[in-house]
Amino acid sequence: MAHKKKTVAEVGTSGGAAAAAGVGFQQQIAAYALAHVLVGDTALGTFGLDREFNFRSLHMETAQAIDDVVIIGHSHRALIQAKTKVSLSDAEESAYGDVLRQFVAHHVRDGRDGDAYVLAVGGTKVSRHIRVDLTRLTELTRLNARALDENPRTGAEDEVLEKTRTLITLFLSKEGIASPTEDEFIAIFRRIYVLPLDFEGPRGRDEASALLLLRAKASIDSALVWAALLKLSGTLAIERGSIDKAGLFARAGHYLRPEGKPEKTLLGEMLLEVLTPLDPSVGKDVVMFAAPGHESEALVVTASERFHDDGSLTTIFTRKGFKHADGGVQPIVCRSATLDGTLRYVRDNPHVQEGRKILVDQNRLSQNFESSVWAKAHKQFLRGLFDEKRQDLSCIVCGNPVSEDGAYVVEVEEEGASPAAGIAHRRCPYPGLRMIGEVKSPLFAHYKGLHDFDFNRWIAAAQKGSSILTTSVVQGTAVVLWNSRPPGHPRGGWCVRIDASDGSSHYVHHRAKVLRFAQESAITEAVERQRTFDEAAATGDPYCVPEDRTLFARRSFLTRTLPRGTKLLQCAKASAVAFDVAIDKAYSSPTPYYAPVTLLVTPERGDAADVGGNVVMLSNPLNLLVFLENWQQASLNVPSIAADVIDTDEIFDRVVGQALSIGKTVLVDPLFDENGTLVSGLEIQLNQ
């Protein structure tokens, strides 16, 4: 039985750092920092530090007043308090009070220029007052020390500021500073950074980011390196210990690739692994062609040396074959560096033989055809060509990405063409392309369902963060409303603030980014919003937002859509306010909204594949085989499939717009029952 559809207009990324399998949030933070140091990211910009930060050591449960995690650099420190449950309070014994007490104690007793006091938060039990309002206020004071006097604030921000000021002033007094001044308060307040981190479950954004960082550098499975860093952090926490850069590399540095080797970019390094150990033949050509006069009965395989003593080529090849002395072209089936390569091509393409015998012409080759100076020089030249293509995952023939275990390593050397080398799909070689090896990749073999998939591009896109299509997946089915035309003006200096019934604020946004308007447009928008609020309230069905501000709609709609018990706040007032950087940083997501996702396409044409009459996207392409198995069980007509990375919202809009314009249904992560009825996934619909 299909689940009832829910409508998702906008769903935010849920943070999460609850202890999992005995691993605590504090331990995960330390491992996350160590992962960055291990891969060479010494700036540690993720921890809210806005200047160069050269890592020296990390300390756990230290004697410092801020005693969860301390990261020490050559110039300054990041002192981290880790909390998965914290809300705004002016109570001295509250979790928030405990954080500020430690910030103040450290500042008074051991504060140094440049120290950053980091409140790392994770999980769903961290209030918006902390995650958003405190973030904006502290950012404002870093931009302008007088910002708290000069910039307008919301009621929620006033509450955050006053309760925070009360606690910091109280703790300063307890540290012996009588009648603390506003400047002494600001000196601490502007050093506070709020750092949301997500390590929760298989979709934890920051754990996934750490794994991707490690994967590029590690010589073993990145998950094992991450597990080792978690274990190391746990040991440090138990022992109240510390580790410096030398100690970190002594523990885990041997899991990294040796210095001097190129960074592992999936296929980039793999090509060299194919070439160097196999020492491909460059001194001869092995060609297969139909036996003259007996074309329907036999194929001939013959080998010849490539270079004359003077370095000239013994045979001139074209795309279709080789030239005879009279200038005529002998068509060939394939060209390879070895006999084994030719026979492998026949095994990969059994239609080539068509019942014909294969006759091998045992031409006698000289003893030094591989060791001549011309062969040695060409081998070095060939490796240089591969060095240029080290990070290129595209097919040298069709240009599409290659993610095929057993794909061909090839060389272009033919009349009228510039020398080149690279890889090619098994379906792509033309007769004159010289095959010199094959790609062997455990990664490609494991994810063999991902044809023509650009792993490097996906990794780069995934590092930017999760999309709404990842974080919106629920049990059953749901609808995501799509609109490709954002209102507002990208450089407008004004925005529209919505004040809720609890005094907190929300800004009119599009795709998780605050909308900017010209001043007149912002005033008009605010007036229209206020009219809508007043009319809806008069009917008894007011406009509301949940506490996390992820959805904006009438109360009746939110009650039907959101989980039971979700607290709703009535939208009370709309007003036009000046836009500033702090608003953007606190209320906008820096990442794409819909991207990254993967579109299933046809290998031949590259257009969207038809899966049971639907255009299909996956939020995690590595799960493709699970979906293929489900679709097969549901008896859906699934064509030959390749996968294309959608890494920007602009590409997403183009794909969805084209699909909806021709009446196609666009589904994300669809699963079906045996009758072909959709039972799980998201449907993208036009927001009328």
Image (cartoon, rainbow, N blue to C red):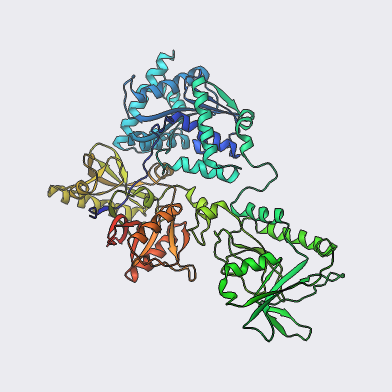
Left or right of 70 on screen, residue 519? left
Residue 520, quarter of the rendered image: bottom left
Observer-nearest of 389 and 679:
679
Residue 60: percent from left, percent from top: 51, 24
- Quadrant of the image containing the C terminus: bottom left
Residue 433, quarter of the rendered image: bottom right
Residue 192: percent from left, percent from top: 45, 30
Residue 390: percent from left, percent from top: 65, 56
Vertical order, 616 against 317 (above or below): above
* Res 484 visible: no
Observer-nearest of 118 and 247:
247
Observer-nearest of 68 and 54:
68
Vertical order, 677 against 90 (above or below): below
How many numbered dots are placed on residues in this image?
Answer: 0
Residue 380, quarter of the rendered image: bottom right
Residue 529: percent from left, percent from top: 24, 51
Vertical order, 605 against 209 (above or below): below
Residue furthest out toward the left: 539
Residue furthest out toward the top: 176
Observer-nearest of 368 and 607:
368
* Res 55 visible: yes
Residue furthest out toward the right: 309
Left or right of 650 on screen, residue 128? left
- Quadrant of the image containing the N terminus: bottom left
Vertical order, 326 against 583 (above or below): below
